[in-house]
Image (cartoon, rainbow, N blue to C red):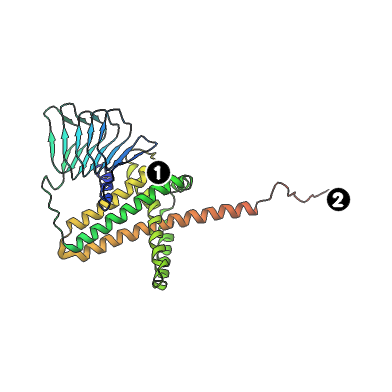
Amino acid sequence: MKRLAALLALCMILMTLAVPAAAEGIYVRSEGGDRIRILEDAVISEPIQGNAVFVLGDVTVNSKVGGHVITVFGDAVVNSVVSGQVVSLFGNTVLHEDAQVMGDVITIGSLTKSGSAVISGQEVRILGEAMNLDIGAFSYLRLIIVLLFTLAVFIIGMLSLLISRKRYISISKRLDRSFSRKIILGILAFTGASALLLILLLTLVAPLLYIILLLVASIPAFMYLGRKILKSFSPKNSIHAEFITGLVTVTLVKLIIIFLIPQQSILLSVIIIGIISIFIYSLGLGIMAEQYYLKGSRSGAKDTAPGPEEKKPETGKAE
């Protein structure tokens, strides 16, 4: 579980593969002290309490990091203490003399370790230093679709969490309650929306609205999955961290399925990814439906409650 949680942030970088690199990077800082930097190199010269995530950029750690150090398509050079794990996806990891990693070191790429560097956990090398990503045209198309969809969910999700923060905090408070009800409501909602799409398929608006609905529904679903994963590290996490964790984890699982299942069994790969996607959409729609239902119930209760001006009928004593 810990290794999987460490790998989750890795996938975040993959969503940026479909867009050109901008002149300036993207920088995000959460309330929990997490720092996320995309499309830009960085040097950590001051202590960081949370996690440090870098996508399409290299990082040099010269000061203590209280959480994990995660790089995607970038190199990680560690010269200080990392309280969590060091994870590098498709990049080089270099541990110098002063490097002390309290957790595991997980790499998809090369690992260079100085003789005095300390790794308290395990060294996990996935695929080794030589990675063969020679896949067929159809698999490449699926890979692009997965990355584009992940990028869209990430952008819409981050904007939604910033704009409708109170709404998603309210949703977050009820994520752990009644999973079965969420799934049942979600399956019904997903089936109904899909049936409506088939009826209105000839129109241009229906498919667009359907895609937007799935994108928005994915946000609370990824928050739910991210919370379940992060609970093994901390009982309280920001909604941003939960969302990114769930998004990265699911994307990573899809990528592993695309890469590891042989081309001869491509139908099996499509079915598995389809089931995962339907589960995510149903869970998200169920969470949204439950939130709407509870909100309507509270509003109805307020409408039926006696107002301050209403008086109870007097029951005087008989004369």
Q: Amino acid at mark 2?
A: Ala
Q: Residues within 10 Å of mark 2 (few under 14, many from 20)?
A: few
Residue plotted at (27% across, 49% down)? 16
Label 1 vs 2, first from the N-terminus = 1
Whether pointer 1 and pointer 2 mark residues with C-beta atoms closer than 8 Å, the reply is no
Nearer-the-camera pick, 181 or 155: 155
| Residue 315 numbered mark, or none | none
Residue 129 place in picture, x, y as percent: 11, 44
Q: Residues within 10 Å of mark 1 (few under 14, many from 20)?
A: many
Camera-side mark, 1 or 2: 1
Residue plotted at (13% across, 56% down)? 134
Q: Amino acid at mark 1?
A: Ile
The answer to whether residue 227 shows anywhere in this view is no
Nearer-the-camera pick, 174 or 111: 111
Nearer-the-camera pick, 126 or 315: 126
Circle 2 residue: 318
Q: Judge whether 319 appears above or below 28 on screen.
A: below
Circle 1 residue: 239
Q: Is residue 57 left or right of residue 246?
A: left
Give the distance between the C-alpha atoms of the residues marked 1 and 2, in whole angstroms.
62 Å
Residue 1 place in picture, x, y as percent: 27, 44
